[in-house]
Image (tube, grey):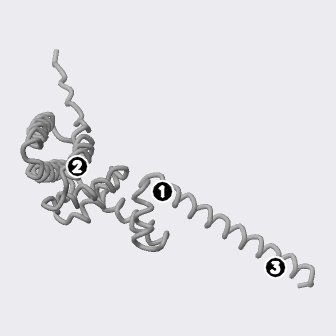
């Protein structure tokens, strides 16, 4: 092999290596942008919590895989009506007993999540699972849950804010409708 041939071969190998690096970097950037767009503030929280973008993205990908394995489904019309009526009663209780109303709202959210198919045991896991579908409200939900967990030390305004946040998540959870069955008539 001549020195010109070797030079050309080395140049081709270097160009191929640079092209591979560019393609890999572009794929990582697209994946990062996809996670950031899908998880919005939850992406930043995951990066802050893990201290590393790659670890955060791996965690968010794991959440997506875990969520795909869950049997999440809409509420039936009967369930939805029952939960909406229970929410109205809970909200009406707030004036006379804000702490009790917030505790009831927390319990009611867990019931709705369970009825939809979300795991409700461990709060951190629950919030992570919900973040796949409701990323824009999960940070607020965490704050509201902290207020509910320490309601004896919370001001009435903190309780009211937590109740509003719970209502926002509640509305999203009950809004999705189950497909209606079509009845065919025989002739």
Relative depth, front residue between 126 and 95: 95
Quadrant in which residue 4 is drawn:
bottom right
Which residue is at a point 48% across and 56% down the rendered structure image? 36
Which residue is under mark 3? 10
Residue 103 picture location, percent across and down:
11, 53
Within the image, what quadrant is residue 75 found in?
top left
Q: Earlier in the sequence, mark 2 or mark 1?
A: 1
Q: Is residue 6 above or below residue 122?
A: below
Q: Which residue is mark 2?
A: 157
The structure residue drawn at horizontal position 49% and vertical position 70%, both measured from the top left corner, is 54
Locate residue 8 relative to residue 117 in the image: left or right: right
**N-term mark: 1 or 3:** 3
Q: Secondary structure at mark 3?
A: helix
Q: CA distance from mark 2 to mark 3?
A: 69 Å
Marks 2 and 3, the one that precedes in the sequence: 3
Q: Tally the marks.
A: 3
Residue 170 percent location from the top left of the image: 22, 44
Q: Residues within 10 Å of mark 1 (few under 14, many from 20)?
A: some
For residue 110, the mark is none
Q: Which residue is mark 1?
A: 36
Residue that appears at 21% across and 30% down: 180
Q: Nearer the viewer, mark 2 or mark 3?
A: 2
- Spatial separation of the CA atoms under disc 1 and disc 3: 39 Å
- Above or below — where is 186 with respect to 17? above
């Amino acid at each position: 092999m001549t020195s010109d041939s070797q030079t050309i071969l080395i140049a081709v190998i270097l160009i191929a290596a640079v092209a591979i690096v560019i393609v890999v970097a572009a794929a990582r950037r697209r994946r990062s942008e996809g996670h950031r767009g899908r998880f919005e503030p939850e992406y930043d929280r995951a990066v802050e919590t893990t201290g590393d973008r790659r670890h955060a993205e791996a965690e968010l990908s794991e959440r997506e895989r875990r969520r795909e394995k869950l049997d999440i489904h809409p509420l039936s019309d009967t369930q939805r009506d029952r939960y909406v009526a229970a929410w109205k009663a809970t909200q009406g209780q707030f004036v006379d007993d804000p702490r009790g109303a917030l505790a009831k709202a927390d319990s009611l959210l867990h019931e709705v999540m369970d009825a939809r198919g979300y795991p409700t045991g461990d709060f951190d896991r629950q919030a992570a699972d919900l973040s796949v579908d409701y990323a824009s409200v999960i940070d607020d939900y965490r704050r509201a849950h902290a207020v509910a967990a320490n309601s004896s030390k919370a001001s009435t305004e903190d309780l009211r804010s937590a109740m509003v946040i719970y209502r926002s998540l509640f509305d999203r959870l009950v809004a999705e409708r189950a497909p209606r069955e079509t009845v065919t008539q025989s002739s």
